[in-house]
Amino acid sequence: MIGNRQSQLVALGFLGGAACGALAWTHFRRQFRHALFSRSPMRRFAALSYLRSRPSVDTVRILREYIAWEKIPMLRHQGLSLLRRAEASLT
């Protein structure tokens, strides 16, 4: 009986933490949506994440500039993937 109640509280805590984390990431993403050329890799990642849902001609243009500028291979690869996806959605 006590174990069941405890497992429910643990599950509730996990779900609450996941929800808070999702809200925090959404806020972070919106806050740094224009930080594609920031010094901070986390801000650049947040800006890429923001651009993922906004394929447009401007997004393609700025992603091309970003890929040429980015020095971190993982972020450059992420930008290239987003560029290909945006180009495919526009054609």
Image (spheres, grey):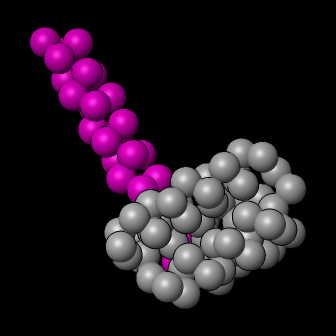
Magenta span of residues: 1-30
- On whether residue 42 falls in the magenta region, the answer is no
- On whether residue 10 falls in the magenta region, the answer is yes
Where in the figure is residue 5, as x and y percent of width and height? 19, 23
Q: Depth check: 65 or 27 in front?
A: 65
Q: Is residue 74 left or right of residue 12?
A: right
Q: Quadrant of the C terminus?
A: bottom left
Residue 65, picture quadrant:
bottom right
* Vertical arrangement, residue 9 with respect to residue 73, above or below: above
Q: Residue at x 43, y 76 (%)?
A: 55
Q: Residue at x 54, y 80 (%)?
A: 59
Q: Residue at x 62, y 81 (%)?
A: 61
Main SS, magenta region, reads helix
Q: Residue at x 42, y 77 (%)?
A: 54
- Is residue 23 visible to us here? no
Where in the figure is residue 2, as x and y percent of width and height? 20, 15
| The furthest residue to the front | 91
Where in the figure is residue 3, as x and y percent of width and height? 23, 12
* Vertical arrangement, residue 80 with respect to residue 60, above or below: above
Q: Depth check: 26 or 72 in front?
A: 72
